[in-house]
Amino acid sequence: MSTELRRLRNYIGGEFRDAADGRTTEVVNPATGEAYATAPLSGAADVDAAMAAAAEAFPGWRDTTPAERQKALLKIADAFEERAEELIAAEVENTGKPTGLTRTEEIPPMVDQIRFFAGAARMLEGKGAGEYMEGLTSFVRREPVGVCAQVAPWNYPMMMAVWKFAPAIAAGNTVVLKPSDTTPASTVLIAEILGSILPKGVFNVVCGDRETGRLMVEHPTPAMASITGSVRAGMAVAESASKDLKRVHLELGGKAPVVVFEDVDIAKAVAGISEAGYFNAGQDCTAATRVLVHESVHDEFVRALAKAASGIRTGMPDDEDVLYGPLNNPNQLAQVEGFIERLPAHARVEAGGKRVGDQGYFYAPTVVSGLKQDDEIVQKEVFGPVITVQSFTDEDQAVAYANGVEYALASSVWTKDHARAMRMSKKLDFGCVWINTHIPLVAEMPHGGFKKSGYGKDLSAYGFDDYTRIKHVMTSLED
């Protein structure tokens, strides 16, 4: 007996629509491995329609006052709170995440971030007007960039949608947002919520695959393309956008070093690092999954981490005792399994290293030690619940190992020595350095990396600035 699949639709110009050519793709719940919905597989006609709607809405939204945009965003934040259980249900079905953790760890930050950008809308800053040339006054206008093409990832589909639309809309832009093809459900619900508050065309959602994303980025209408995703995807976006010199905002992969010195409390460090490494099944660009430990405490740390991993559970969303749910899709499960299968002979699997169950895409919390700096699993992003451990001899070697990857998004230092922590925060070539903690984010502080982790900032006033352009205006003081 088959169950009819729920039909998700695009949201364009204030209306829910199927793909123009009727094509769809199945959406699978990763906790069960079973399809629960279909979503549009949007093509050029759908992208054209969304871009036209956003372009038509832009002049009116651009000309609203910051106070009006703030009021709209505050209504959106209130609506997110009021419809939190619907959002949680959609996100859990999208991702298989634990229901309780989605309620406590995602809804409050999302609401706070929307409210932060509501305030940011009224805090545009620029140089004060002045006479920098005799008889002439100069001042700076801060303006929205225009239509923004945005692509969100599957690891935090709901929260990353907020990180995309909130600063863009607060700054006076209009948006065409594409969720991942594996996780469109919560984004379609967000479109329903925003559609009841914003003017038609200000926020649009187009579902689809990589080809849909390519069509969005290459479309002549957007002034800016923003993506959170893989390095490969980011490079493709940058190349496509270069053809008409679109502004590009990229938040890409990570390989966060976690540098543990010999003076730490091992138990406290292991507790913090294991939670930050395994949360969301390690599917986080900032996850604490590459640990560097001073040689004098290496063995003790590995034993403690392996013990901690053995006490962490993955499982179904309604199980209140699990820390994380499944990997997002079968391809991601195969990628994680492949890293473990290809481990070199000198590596040791201290815990986990295997799939859990035969339903869904669950993988055990895993610890791998005995690794060398040039090993594949050290250099490449696993994006799964796998923590690697290496040893170092001194501070200089720790810095060299930490910086010796192509990513540069986030890092952490664990030590009781304040001076050493300050030296490390200077030397670590990453967009974020946590000290004696790992993974907390706040709306007021920027999130973004260097090197192949991309460029541009999410969150904070810096993230808001990325969605504005600067215009110099000069006027004569003479009649």
Image: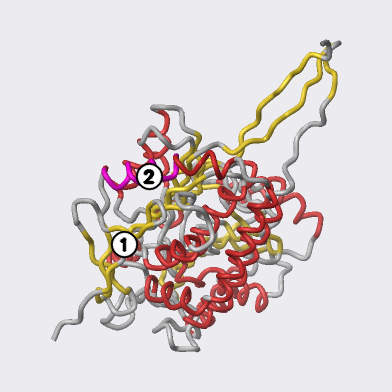
Is residue 103 part of the magenta span, yes or no? Answer: no
In front: 244, or 29?
A: 244
Which residues are drawn in magenta? 45-55
Q: Amino acid at mark 2?
A: Arg
Q: Is residue 19 left or right of residue 280?
A: left
Q: Quadrant of the C terminus?
A: top right
**Residue 299 at least partly seen:** no
Secondary structure type for disc 1: loop
Q: Is residue 351 above or below residue 253?
A: below
Q: Which residue is mark 1?
A: 9
Quadrant housing the N terminus: bottom left
- Kind of residue at disc 1: Arg
Side of 367 where 272 appears, left or right: right
Q: Nearer the viewer, residue 249 or 264?
A: 249
Q: Nearer the viewer, mark 1 or mark 2?
A: 1
Above or below, comparing residue 290 to residue 87 in the picture: above
Residue 246, image x, y percentages:
46, 32
Who's the residue at 61% across and 48% down the image? Answer: 430
Q: Quadrant of residue 114?
A: bottom right
Q: Residue at x 75, y 49 (%)?
A: 423
* Label 2, residues with CA under 10 Å away: few <14, some 14-19, many ≥20: few
At x 36%, y 42%, the residue is 216
Q: Are marks 1 and 2 in contact (CB under 8 Å)?
A: no
Residue 410 in the image: x percent, y percent?
59, 54
